């Protein structure tokens, strides 16, 4: 393996080009990624940006040092869907006066946020440096950090927002270059499905910064009455609070380019008087499930929790690291078809890598070829080719096995010993034979599949002397 590394290059959605990454301050590299809206358990599509930007976070820390990288990923816990979920789950208690709507909302979001944290940890993701909750940044703060109400006041003062029909709206016409990220020309935008047209708007594309709340809805006191923020202003406030008016990288899913990220840019630039909000904008591609758009109506909508803990996809549950590898096998900017076949491929590949890595007693030096691949706009597929090469060269205690172990650790995969427990396998086989004798095929298949997931393949046959069923096993490499 060579020892010469290259610099980091990233595809910038803002310029539609791959660029050398040059941080504003190499001692304070800053990245913001839009996190989940916690009205329900996070679905598998939500997992993709979490995993992708976890890899980038690891890479940035490799280049600039753990202490010099700040990764902010928010939690959206104020949203109309959250209000509806709170009313659905706690409507009776609210009606009886036992629980306020705000308290019910907190219960909903605490439960789903906690589950999200458990899920992404199982996917091998590091915790972000900071994880702000939107509700904590609505009103002016004692610590002086940026907040939504103050940002909206600044936009009104600078002539970029107006009050109409009880709402505060951003005036898109006040920003001559609005639409740079999505390449949408404001003059060409037509009223349609993505843009609500209301009589009180100056332009069809104007969007809500603040809206009034009814007594049944959560709200905060503001100069414009008791209300709640629009979706876009939340990320403008939280990113400014921890990363400043201009920072290095902003990430999220492709579906967020318009309107969310476009409107974040408009709010932040106009409130602060800056030419950019973030220097680099990165977006991961869409996700399909078995070739179809994920939809509850199609019955192919899966939460991360379901895939990890239940047998709803492919008739079995899946280890978090298998889901992680399956996500990273496709380049982050490309669409991904999330399928049982892809998960099986990821599982088999990961098994081979870990068996080979287990030949090394400890992790060695991280190969520069892995870093170089990832440095080319997170080319994970090229990095995985290096891992496969190392697995083929791995022998007991050699450099290739140690380098493979280091690579797996760096990429967020567990490298605990893959050596088999012979006694445990023998007991599992005995249990399976007992289930077969009882004609409990489901439990017998479950044990076989669990062993296979651990790299142990069973082979059924008959004892030549007695004719009785016997089962042998081998470790798949």
Image (cartoon, helix red, strand yellow):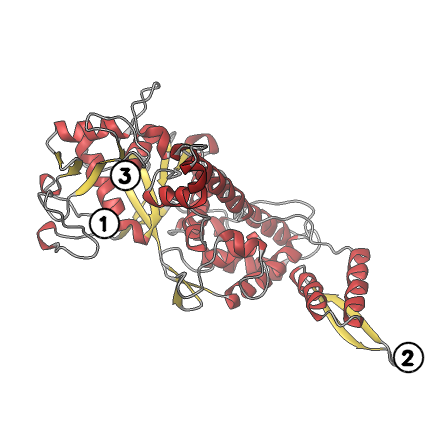
Q: Position of residue 270 (x, y in %)?
A: 17, 34
Vertical placement of residue 143 versus 35, above or below: above
Q: Camera-side residue: 250 or 83?
A: 83
Q: Position of residue 108 (x, y in %)?
A: 45, 40
Vertical placement of residue 274 versus 36, above or below: above
Q: Nearer the viewer, mark 2 or mark 3?
A: 2
Residue found farthest to the top: 142
Which residue is denoted by mark 2 in the rendering?
Answer: 466
Name the residue rendered at 13%, 55% in the picture. Answer: 191
Q: Nearer the viewer, mark 1 or mark 2?
A: 2
Residues under labels 2 and 3: Cα distance?
74 Å
In the picture, residue 352 is in which quadrant?
Answer: bottom right
Structural crowding at the residue carrying mark 3, measured as other residues with C-alpha within 10 Å and reported as few (<14), some (14–19) or many (≥20): many
In the picture, residue 469 is in which quadrant?
Answer: bottom right
Left or right of 366, for residue 200 = left
Q: Which mark is residue 278?
A: 3
Q: Which mark is residue 15?
A: 1
Residues under labels 1 and 2: Cα distance?
74 Å
Q: Which quadrant is the C terminus positioned in? A: bottom right
Q: Camera-side residue: 352 or 102?
A: 102
Judged from the image, the secondary structure of the residue bearing numbered disc 1 is loop
Left or right of 223, for residue 309 = right
Examine the rendering and report whether any part of residue 470 can be seen.
yes
């Amino acid at each position: 393996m060579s020892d010469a590394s290259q610099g980091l290059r990233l595809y910038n959605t803002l310029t539609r080009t791959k660029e050398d990454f040059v941080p504003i301050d190499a001692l304070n590299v800053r990245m913001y990624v839009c996190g989940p809206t916690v009205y329900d358990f996070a679905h598998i599509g939500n997992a993709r940006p979490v995993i992708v930007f976890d890899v980038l976070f690891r890479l940035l820390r490799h280049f600039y040092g753990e202490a010099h990288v700040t990764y902010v990923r928010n939690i959206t816990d104020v949203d109309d869907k959250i209000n509806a979920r709170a009313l659905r789950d706690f409507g009776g208690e609210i009606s009886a006066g036992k629980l306020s709507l705000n308290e019910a909302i907190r219960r909903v979001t605490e439960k789903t946020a906690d589950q999200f944290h458990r899920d992404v940890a199982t996917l091998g993701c590091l915790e972000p440096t900071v994880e702000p909750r939107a509700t904590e940044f609505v009103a002016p703060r004692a610590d002086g950090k940026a907040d939504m109400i103050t940002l909206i006041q600044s936009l009104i003062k600078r002539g970029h927002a107006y009050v109409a029909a009880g709402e505060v709206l951003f005036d898109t016409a006040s920003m001559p270059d609005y639409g740079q990220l999505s390449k949408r020309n404001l003059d060409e935008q037509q009223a349609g499905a993505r843009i609500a047209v209301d009589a009180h708007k100056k332009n069809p594309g104007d969007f809500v910064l603040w809206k009034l709340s009814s007594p049944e809805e959560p709200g905060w006191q503001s100069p414009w009455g008791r209300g709640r923020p629009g979706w876009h202003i939340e990320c403008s406030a939280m990113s400014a609070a921890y990363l400043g008016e201009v920072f290095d990288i902003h990430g999220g899913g492709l579906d967020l380019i318009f309107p969310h990220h476009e409107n974040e840019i408009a709010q932040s630039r106009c409130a602060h008087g800056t030419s950019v909000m973030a220097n680099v904008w990165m977006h991961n591609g869409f996700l399909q499930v078995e070739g179809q758009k994920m939809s509850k109506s199609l019955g192919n909508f899966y939460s991360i929790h379901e895939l990890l803990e239940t047998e709803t996809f492919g008739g079995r549950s899946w280890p978090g690291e298998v889901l992680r590898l399956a996500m990273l096998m496709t380049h982050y900017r490309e669409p991904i078809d999330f399928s049982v076949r892809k998960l099986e491929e990821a599982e088999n590949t990961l098994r081979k890598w870990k068996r080979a890595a287990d030949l090394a007693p400890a992790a060695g030096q991280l190969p520069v070829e892995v870093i170089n691949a990832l440095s080319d706009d997170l080319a994970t597929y090229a990095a995985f080719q290096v891992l496969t090469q190392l697995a083929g060269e791995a022998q007991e205690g050699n450099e290739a096995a140690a380098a493979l172990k280091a690579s797996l650790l760096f990429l967020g995969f567990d490298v605990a010993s893959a050596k088999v427990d012979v006694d445990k396998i023998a007991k599992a086989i005995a249990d399976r034979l007992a289930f077969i004798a009882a004609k409990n095929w489901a439990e017998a298949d479950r044990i076989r599949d669990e062993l296979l997931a651990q790299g142990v393949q069973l082979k059924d046959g008959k004892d030549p002397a007695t004719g009785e069923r016997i089962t042998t096993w081998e470790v798949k490499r």
